[in-house]
Amino acid sequence: MSGVSIQRISKSFGQTRVLRDVSLEVGPREFLTLLGPSGCGKSTLLRIIAGLEQADEGSIALGGQQVDGLLPRQRDVAMVFQSYALYPYMTVAENIGLPLLMRRTRAWQRLPLIRRLHPVARAAAGTIATDVRRAAEALQIAPYLERKPSQLSGGQRQRVALARAMVRNPRVFLMDEPLSNLDAKLRVSARAEIADLHRRAGVAFIYVTHDQAEAMTMSDRVGLMMDGEILQVAPPGEIYDEPAALRVAEFIGSPKINTLPGVVRADGGVAVPGGVLEGGSGLAAGTEVVAGIRPEHWILGMSGASGSLGALSGTVRHLENLGSDLFLYAESQGGGPLLTVRAAPETVRQVSPGTAVALKPRPGRVLLFDRSGQRLRARP
């Protein structure tokens, strides 16, 4: 079994620092996603693991073996690119089988006439064809083996790229935004295929994306990257519910988390524009904080209930009904940004733009950060 150990990797392109002292451990059977905005360094880190880029500092180990001096073909990793990188003049079968052909035969055995007549070359071609068909059947592209990539849909080409990686039985799969060229419907089904491939392959997957839905639905752990650094590595549920920094909280979640500047009161509550978030912070009175509340963590009431709820008072400015969810945007009486509330449509039938409402966070669901954006933990 082969895990991945990344130790203090740094990389610059000219005067631009792309990676800053990045360290990460990936388990032998783990699916880890590097998530972050474009330009944060996640693809560069993936290319360094594959050997396509050289780090300025640090080291990479696969299965306990240092691979910094090895060529990409010597590292026994399979990489799936955003562009699929299929050869347009080859059939699907030839594209899938190419890594096996290069690995199992010598250059002279690949000549067309010798491949047909030489017994060793013919035997190798037979085993390659068997492995190609097995991978194609697993990804439901066996009927297309004799087609060219130009004759396939985007989803089918993506499956061919996956099959080509799969036949190699690599010790690590590396995937660089492989679904970004697919439409929304195909991305959903492709996520399930990649997750199933991971279960069957039983090796480490490192997946790069800027799409949090991909990261949250497929991963054992998510590593959130920004500005060349990994801010937090945690299971999807933990990185959503317990973000280590405000930047993590704001990137994860759609709609974006609500944030309000506040000051801790003597009773433990947090005074914010428009009211007070109820106590229990455990922080010293006078501490300046930023309070974060997810849209689904508000309790919504009518304006007259604000006193009993201890809630913020506000006015509805806009509604978005998505069928299963309704997003309500309210302006707090204390000013500041619009507050976003996620609610079931049937619970807010009497609400319309201009309605006065009261908003209270659910117990234990207020996240507090200091003014630099680091998470503040309540003292016991």
Image: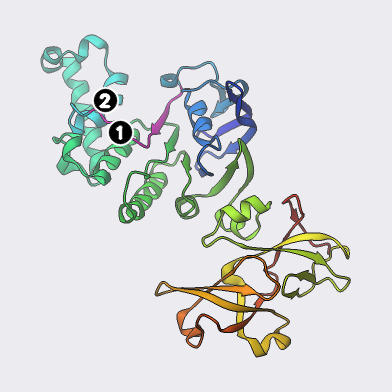
Whether residue 73 appears in magenta in the rendering, the answer is: no
Vertical order, 306 against 193 (above or below) = below
User: For residue 164, what is the image quadrant?
Assistant: top left
Q: Give the residue type that dot 2 points to.
A: Leu
Could you tell me which secondary element the residue under label 1 belongs to?
helix
Which residue is at the front of the view, 32 or 152? 152
Q: How many numbered marks does the figure carry? A: 2
User: For residue 13, what is the image quadrant?
Assistant: top right
Answer left or right for 58 relative to 190. Answer: right
Which span of residues is magenta-colored? 75-87
Task: Report which residue position mark 1 lands on.
Answer: 164
Answer left or right for 103 relative to 248. Answer: left
Answer left or right for 37 relative to 145. Answer: right
> Residue 123: x percent and y percent?
19, 21
Colour scheme of this structure image? Answer: rainbow
Which residue is at the front of the view, 129 or 123? 129
Vertical order, 277 against 90 (above or below) = below
> Residue 126: x percent and y percent?
18, 26
Name the dominant secondary structure of the magenta segment. loop
